[in-house]
């Protein structure tokens, strides 16, 4: 990999580095960093591990109630399983405590021995606790997808980086090549999300859902970013660059928000020219998902650094625009937090909030994005640092269960019943929250050391 020239390195440090802190910073963030570390170690990690370890059948348990009592039904999804592997690997790095590496190895073995389809290849999306594959309820032949296999690559790559287990890296490579053969679109680019059991991709709408989407795309990019750091293969770089440009230049709208679904030829699905009534019947296909926007802002930045494009002004501009769009159109100015969904209708200047709830993961991603922007733009009129402090306070008051541990599934200012909702299920793990907290602690620490 080519190194940045001296002037490029200088620009990188000025524009992107989390280690640079402006003298104009108004708030001492060290107390927040200390609070975050205490939350991570004494609340979050103690709630999850080793509680979720399934010593009998392997992998990680999925379903726990609000008091962390385990439920009878325990399906296991490739996404959740892989995210636990990633989280435990990163915790091993962050803390130096090798118990987390043991937890990660436990999950790796379940992926290797149980979740990989030994006949057709690829990882099953969902299995029973014992490891029997479960087909999607409405699509009997569809039990694999690009999104889940991407997260397998993500978790396996992180585990290899920390453990040095060469077999784990080989499994990550195997998964990459399987996606290359069965999901990658060599004609238009990108990846088909749904995949039949035999490996054939679904290239047209499936139950009115288009074949390509932003969510699988951003996480495929995320997975390849992790993989490329431990396996700098030319094809991986080529696909990583392809996904980076696809997301930055096609999937992100001019307003700075992700367009959710695309046709086979990458035409975004849009209802901008439809009536409000028609749009709202189909809003799940076309709306602003503010949490995904703030998350993608970070993911673009991360990938650009790995591709040695960190000082690219277009990427920087778009990353900022994504956070700004979420703040302008989806930020709760009174209480803090971003709403789950909104839309700006044609010929209207003000957003319409379609879902005023505040999902837990979106708040974590927004927290992280605000800190990044505050370091890149300390004097910006958007006042990122001020909003970062407010977002942290909002999270402490509305999302952290200080009695039983962990994060609520949604902010209780809008959904007070979230106090009694499941603390863990196949779509609620701890990767978003752990990543955000670790990265915020690290950024605050490095910025302080730079001064």
Image: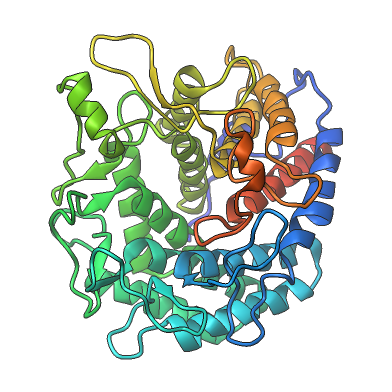
- What residue appears at the point 77 percent right and 21 percent down from the top-left corner? 23
- What residue appears at the point 60 percent right and 49 percent down from the top-left corner? 421
- What residue appears at the point 80 percent right and 22 percent down from the top-left corner? 27
In the rendered image, residue 376, in percent from the top left (x then y), is placed at 61, 29
Residue 164 in sight: no
Vertical placement of residue 6 versus 203, above or below:
above
In the rendered image, residue 86, in percent from the top left (x then y), is placed at 59, 65
Number of callouts in the render?
Answer: 0
Q: Is residue 69 left or right of residue 4?
A: right
In the rendered image, residue 176, in percent from the top left (x then y), is placed at 37, 72
* Foreground pick, 326 / 247: 326
Q: Is residue 222 left or right of residue 60?
A: left
Q: Is residue 316 left or right of residue 199?
A: right
Work out which quarter of the rendered image holds the C terminus and state it: top right
Vertical placement of residue 8 versus 207, above or below:
above
In the rendered image, residue 270, in percent from the top left (x then y), is placed at 20, 32
* Foreground pick, 410 / 121: 410
Chosen colour scheme: rainbow
* Foreground pick, 214 / 171: 214
* Foreground pick, 219 / 273: 273
- What residue appears at the point 60 percent right and 73 percent down from the top-left corner? 60
Residue 3 in sight: yes
Vertical placement of residue 8 versus 212, above or below:
above
Residue 338 sits in quarter: top right
Residue 273 sits in quarter: top left
């Amino acid at each position: 990999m080519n190194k940045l020239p001296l002037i490029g390195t200088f620009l990188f440090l000025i524009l992107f580095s989390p280690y640079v802190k402006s003298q104009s910073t108004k708030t001492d963030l060290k107390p927040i960093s200390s609070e975050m570390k205490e939350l991570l170690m004494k609340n979050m990690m103690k709630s999850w591990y080793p509680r979720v370890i399934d010593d009998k059948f392997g992998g990680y348990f999925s379903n726990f109630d609000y008091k962390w009592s385990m439920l009878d039904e325990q399906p296991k999804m490739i996404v959740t399983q892989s995210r636990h592997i990633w989280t435990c690997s990163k915790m091993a790095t962050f803390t130096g405590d090798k118990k987390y590496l043991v937890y990660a190895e436990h999950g790796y073995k379940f992926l290797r021995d149980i979740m990989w389809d030994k006949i057709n290849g690829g990882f099953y999306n969902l299995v029973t606790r014992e490891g029997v594959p479960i087909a999607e309820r409405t699509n009997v032949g569809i039990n694999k997808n690009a999104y889940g296999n991407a997260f397998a690559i993500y978790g396996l790559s992180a585990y290899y980086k920390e453990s040095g287990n060469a077999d784990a890296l080989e499994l990550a490579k195997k998964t990459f090549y399987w996606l290359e053969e069965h999901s990658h679109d060599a004609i238009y680019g990108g990846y088909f999300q749904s995949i039949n059991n035999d490996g054939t991709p679904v290239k047209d709408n499936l139950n009115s859902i288009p074949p390509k989407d932003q969510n699988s795309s951003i996480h495929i990019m995320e997975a390849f970013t992790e993989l490329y750091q431990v396996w700098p293969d030319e094809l991986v770089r080529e696909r990583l660059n392809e996904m980076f440009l696809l997301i930055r230049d096609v999937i992100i709208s001019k307003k700075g928000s992700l367009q959710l679904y695309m046709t086979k030829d990458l035409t975004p699905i849009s209802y901008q020219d439809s009536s409000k009534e028609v749009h709202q019947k189909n809003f799940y296909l076309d709306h602003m998902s503010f949490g995904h926007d703030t998350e993608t802002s970070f993911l673009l930045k991360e990938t650009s650094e790995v591709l040695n494009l960190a000082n690219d002004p277009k990427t920087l501009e778009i990353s900022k625009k994504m956070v700004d769009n979420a703040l302008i159109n989806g930020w709760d100015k009174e209480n803090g937090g971003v709403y789950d969904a909104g839309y700006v209708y044609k010929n209207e200047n003000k957003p319409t909030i379609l879902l005023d709830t505040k999902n837990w993961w979106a708040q974590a991603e927004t927290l992280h994005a605000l800190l990044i922007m505050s370091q890149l733009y300390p004097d910006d009129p958007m006042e990122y640092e001020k909003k970062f402090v407010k977002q942290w306070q909002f999270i402490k008051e509305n999302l952290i269960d200080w009695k039983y541990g962990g994060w609520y599934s949604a902010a209780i200012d809008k959904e007070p019943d979230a106090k009694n909702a499941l603390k863990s299920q196949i779509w609620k793990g701890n990767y978003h929250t752990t990543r955000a907290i670790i990265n915020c602690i690290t950024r605050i620490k490095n910025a302080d050391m730079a001064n």
